Image (tube, grey):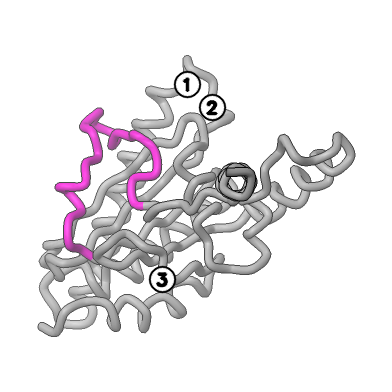
Amino acid sequence: MRVRLWFALCLTEILFTMPLQAGPPLLPVPCEDWEGKPVTLERLKEKVTVVISSNRETMDVGAEVDRDLLYHFGSNQNFTLIRVADLRNVPYLARDIVISTIKARDRAELIELKERFAADGQTASLQSTVFYVLDWQGKFGRAMLQASPLTEYSLFKRDPSRLTRFEKDRVERERQKLADHLHVFVLDQKGDVRGHYLDRGAARQAIPSIRGLLPPT
């Protein structure tokens, strides 16, 4: 009896001290697109999904990467592009202005993309799913960073409650440096992250990964 009790206590301790295994990060938190429509798994089901996460400093680079990926995969119905705008520091009264600005940028990007197709003698035919997620609290972007396969981003998985005050300050500074990039995540049809690419070269790096995941046409 004592042996079984000891074993049960040990098992309980192991279960409570083991790190929780995160599931696929696809739709890590409830979110809506810029029209207020819920982003559901049905909209992304069985598709290769790319999540581009940008802030005000990386928005222009994100637009370039966005256009490059749509140029290569925008006609593929099995491809989804989610643009995540980190808007944590936007005042509530400025939200309508921000949404209007993003919509205007989106229209301008579409025109530039059509011009690029025309210059190459192609007809633009966007069949993929494309939409914005307005991340007012930064939760969506943070969840994606926690799911990153890059070694340095394991810092986002650390439990703040287990850190000293000094460690918390240091970790937060390092996290902010890691967060201040343009982030491009490639997710497979199950929602698992298969690649995490940074900044201006992200499209070039992501394209082979995306091609390898999409079904043959």
**Camera-nearest label, 3 or 2:** 3
Marks 3 and 1, how far apart at CA: 36 Å
Q: Nearer the viewer, residue 185 or 109?
A: 185
Tell me: 180 left or right of 143. Answer: right
Which secondary structure, mark 1?
helix
Stretch of the chain drawn in magenta: 26-47
Point out the frontmost of discs 2 and 1: 2
Q: Residue at x 68, y 55 (%)?
A: 155
Determine if the magenta segment contains residue 27.
Answer: yes
Tell me if residue 172 comes above or below residue 195 in the rendering.
above
Q: Which residue is identified by label 2?
A: 90
Whether residues under marks 2 and 1 lie with C-beta atoms below 8 angstroms apart, the answer is: yes
> In the rendered image, which residue does mark 1 sit on?
94
x and y percentages locating residue 183 in the rendered image = 51, 59
Residue 191, horizontal then vertical, whole percent: 31, 59
Badge 2, how many Cα within 10 Å: few under 14, some, many 20+? few
Q: Which residue sits at x=26%, y=47%?
A: 131
